[in-house]
Image (tube, rainbow, N blue to C red):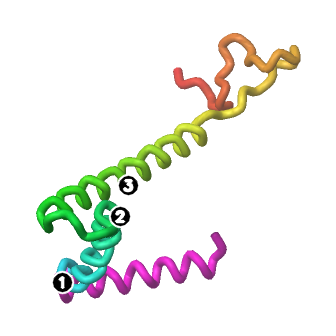
Amino acid sequence: MGAADSLASLRGRIGGLALAAQRDPREYTAAARAAFLVRFEEMVDPDGLLSPAERQRRAEAAKKEHFARLALKSAKTRASKKKSPIRSNGSGDGTTPQGADPYGETQRT
């Protein structure tokens, strides 16, 4: 991310917080949230055969599934980023010397 991207992101955050300080975010995001839920309603009942209550129940379940899948993908990505390469001890076997910190940090005494 470049400096211009960081500034644009910060400006957007400031604008969003200023708007939230003046108005209730639930009011100005209601249309977007409704449109988002319609996506799931159409997915679970493309032919419109279900009762409105059942369609909404299934749409809420589909939305929860969607966010659970996003959380799983995020957790997998974070876990893969946590794995750090093991530094070589010079023996060529990819291990660290006994007592050495694989992260290169100094030991606290």
Q: Amino acid at mark 1?
A: Glu
Q: Position of residue 42 (x, y in %)?
A: 32, 69
Residue at left 37%, top 86%? 15
What's the distance in space between the residues labelled 2 and 1, CA to CA?
26 Å
Closer to the camera, 65 or 46? 46
Q: Residue at x 30, y 69 (%)?
A: 47
**For mark 2, what is the residue?**
43
Please state the horizontal and vertical placement of residue 88, each as a whole percent of the image: 80, 23
Magenta residues, as a range? 1-24
Q: Which residue is mark 1?
A: 27
Name the residue type under label 2: Met
Position of residue 65 in the picture relative to residue 89 (left or right): left
Q: Is residue 77 left or right of residue 22?
A: right
For residue 66, the mark is 3
Q: Residues within 10 Å of mark 1 (few under 14, many from 20)?
A: few
Q: Position of residue 105 (x, y in %)?
A: 63, 31
Q: Secondary structure at mark 2?
A: helix
Relative to residue 96, is residue 34 drawn left or right?
A: left
**Magenta stretch containing residue 4, yes or no?**
yes
Is disc 3 placed on a helix, strand or loop?
helix
Q: Earlier in the sequence, mark 2 or mark 1?
A: 1
* Quadrant assignment, res 59: bottom left
Q: Residue at x 75, y 17 (%)?
A: 95
Tell me the SS state at disc 1: helix
Q: Foreground: 107 or 17? A: 17
